[in-house]
Amino acid sequence: MAENINRRTKTLLYLSAVALGTFVLVALLNHAGIFTFLENKTYDARMVYTSPYFMPSDDVCFIGIDQESLNRAQEERGWSWPWPREAYGMVAEYLKAGGANSLTFDVLFTEPSVYGTSDDDAFAADCTDYGAVVHTMFYNAANPDDVLLPVPQIRQSAALIGSTVSAKDSDDMIRRGRLYFDAGGKKYPALGLAPLLLEEENRALSTDDAISEYEQTLPTSADGTMYLRYKGSIDRYAHYSAYDILKSYDQYVRGEEPEIPPDNFEGAFVFFIFYAPGLFDICSTPISKVYPGAGVHMTLLDGILTDNFIQPLPVIAVYLFLLFCAIIGALCVRGANAASKRGLFLIVLALIAFPSTICVVSYWLFAKNIWIPLVAPLFSFVLSVFGSIIMSYGLEGRQKQFIKNAFSQYLSPAVIDGLIANPHKLKLGGERRHISIFFSDVQSFTSLSEKLSPETLTELLNQYLTEMTNIILEHGGTIDKYEGDAIIAFWNAPSDQADHALRALTAAVKCQNRLAELSDEFTQKVGRPLWTRIGLNTGDAIVGNMGSNLRFDYTMLGDSVNLASRLEGLNKQFGTYLMCSLQTKSESENAGCTLKWRELGRVSVVGKKEAVNVFEPILPTVFEKKEKIYKGFAIALKLFYDGKLTDAKKYFDALSKYDAPSKSYAERCEQLLKKGDFNPALWNGVWVASSK
């Protein structure tokens, strides 16, 4: 026994040495910046993933000279580019009339107007009259003291001169904002801060003092920057076409009702930008490598207004985290006997579970605006695990055998927990489970595949399946199988998941969102985006290992499975892309689902006698924008249920231009009425599916 205790103590000491050595090595590598590039990429991924969940401030908006503005100005006013600066003066007058807090020009006026001095004078007079206009400076990168300012008239008319200088990282990405730029000892506030310095409480202070106050209250780092919380595309901010504003200004001056009322801008911080292709400055941000520079300034202002910035862990906390991961890595090997197959299973599980947990936690914290590093800690953990394994096998004299066994194992991530806990499950058989089922299929994939080479088709399919699978697995789903471009998955087996309906629904919505994000990338590759139709159902099914004694799959069977498959196909008839049964809707709501719903109808699917009610899940933001359409559809659907097909068709016809399900119902009503044998007394309001 004493020998065993000594051996265990020695093992523990060796593993502690491995953990400490790993920590020191990784800490040095981290300090040297070895992980910076990869860490920045994980930062960007978290920003892209979490940005849709943050709404831009209602107090920030922009007016842009887009291509339509250029075209209409040429056609209707005879303005070639550049426009006369009197146009910008009109914008300033209109915003003043509307009570906008400020107008910030992300435009350089460093050269006199090509229309003459009077044009600059008139513009300057409008800016002076407004009293809350921010103009822009630029600087020569080769000589930071060489500041380029607006022409004298315009410079003197500005309430403040703001800086466009951003804080770029080594990879040329703008993840951080700065409050000011120091040129020869003079501080120029950033365009994102300058509008706030014009607020009444700040006007009594000098520019330097006002900047200093913000420095003290905001989470600035030692270099005076802070990490910006991007909120997606710049178009998520309220925005207006410059020419529409000019047209509204003319209407306002003539005493007519403007298309865009001036009070739309009451209390707003307005940016004026160039937004036509080839005019606006492009920068790289976590959101996009082609991002309008004005979006950086608006994001900074938004962050200050809403106190919404990303805060990195303190340096000491980062190094403690590295040490923690190294210790956990060593303990995983200490707690699992690496010499046994079960121990190998547990170690491999730890290599999957711990990094996955850290990743999930990091995304969750990032959504709370806390940035914890990922690459260095995970490297610390993995290095500690493998270092401890080698140390453990060295002590046991079985290093070679371990390496051979460790890399010859095959693990199925979907069922590994159940197999380890219950090895007897490695036999044929199944059990009845209440599950949520997911079927998806890419729209028109067959026709698309006929146009692609085998290599391109394989690359496309692998990328699509990887993206969708990652989302399903992130939400606890089990992949049943792939059938070409189709994905079949389920929840609540083999592990128990009380909220399985909500998980399935959330995964489905995020799959659609991810496809929307990849729209441009797929269009570049194959000429069009990919759209997928998804069917969801919740119900009882037989789940287990099915096949032969030599080869079997963990899969599912039952009517509820068939219904989910039918709902996926039914999307085509309704013109929808996501459809679920009443059971999925009810159970996901019980689990806390916050989505809105549209009842699509009572449907009799192929192979099932009883009609089922089907629904379309809708994001609250989308529902709010299209609420009138959904309410009109509900009225029309009630008429359809009641057998009043003529009245229902009128409603559906009115909505058809904007809504695919309405168009499908309008056509269905017309077909039924044309038959001539429609009897309202015998009508049950059921949509009979014409195909699978």
Image: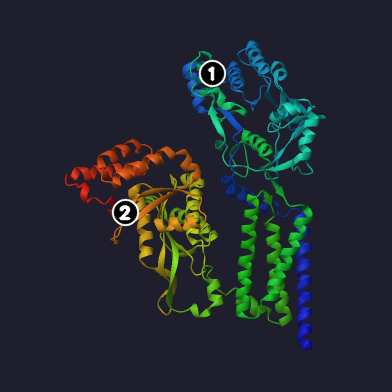
Q: Is residue 353 left or right of residue 577?
A: right
Q: Is residue 220 above or below residue 546?
A: above
Please tell me whether mark 2 sits on a helix, a strand or a loop.
Answer: strand
Quadrant assignment, res 431: bottom left
Q: Residue furthest right?
A: 185
Residue 172 is at least partly visible in this image: no
Q: Quadrant of residue 386?
A: bottom right
Measured in 3D between alpha carbons, the distance from the residue under mark 2 to the one under mark 1, in whole angstroms, is 53 Å
Q: Which residue is mark 2?
A: 603
Q: Residue at x 61, y 15 (%)?
A: 114
x 29%, y 59%: residue: 606
The circle on residue 526 is none
As drawn, is 494 to the left or to the right of 97?
Answer: left
Residue 119: x and y in percent read 62, 13
Amino acid type at circle 1 is: Tyr
User: Where residue 665 sits in the image (x, y, percent)?
Assistant: 31, 44
Instruction: Give the label on residue 249, or none.
Output: 1
In the depicted structure, whether residue 472 falls above or below residue 386: above
The quadrant of the picture occupied by the N terminus is bottom right
| Amino acid type, residue under disc 2 in the picture | Val
Q: Earlier in the sequence, mark 2 or mark 1?
A: 1
